Image (cartoon, rainbow, N blue to C red):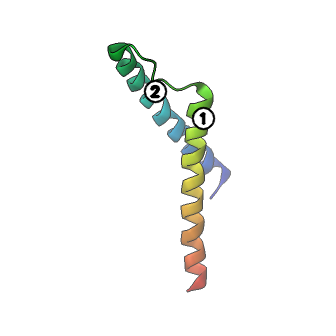
Amino acid sequence: MSAKKLLQAFQEYLMIEKERNLLMFEVSKLLGVDFTFSDEEMIANAEQKLDKMVMEEMEKEMAKWMK
């Protein structure tokens, strides 16, 4: 996978995390308890999703090579 595709995927995952955080902010306002994520947590979550995607892609490629 190219670096450009990896960067795009990471940015997409980060955008999803930011949208999720906005929803959590709304829930937090309603309940009076902070359920939001820090910037570091959002980045870590996006990185975990990217890692998972890369591992799945690698497994697919390895399976092709093994055939």
Q: Compute the Cα span from label 1 to label 2.
A: 12 Å
Crowding near pointer 1: few (<14 within 10 Å), some, many (20+)?
some
| 56 relative to 26, above or below | below
Comparing 59 with 3, the one in front is 59
Comparing 39 with 62, the one in front is 39
In the image, residue 17 lies at what x, y percent?
49, 34
For the C terminus, the quadrant is bottom right
Q: Residue at x 67, y 50 (%)?
A: 3
In the image, residue 65 lies at what x, y percent?
61, 81
Q: Which residue is mark 2?
A: 21
Farthest residue toward the right?
3
Q: Which amino acid is tagged 2?
A: Asn
In the image, residue 48 lies at what x, y percent?
58, 46
Q: Secondary structure at mark 1?
A: helix
Q: Secondary structure at mark 2?
A: helix
Farthest residue toward the left?
30
Q: Residue at x 43, y 29 (%)?
A: 19
For the N terminus, the quadrant is bottom right
Crowding near pointer 2: few (<14 within 10 Å), some, many (20+)?
some
Task: Indicate left or right for 26 with 1 as reference.
Answer: left
Q: Residue at x 55, y 79 (%)?
A: 64
Q: Which residue is mark 1?
A: 43
Q: Earlier in the sequence, mark 1 or mark 2?
A: 2
In the image, residue 11 lies at what x, y percent?
56, 38
Q: Residue at x 58, y 32 (%)?
A: 41
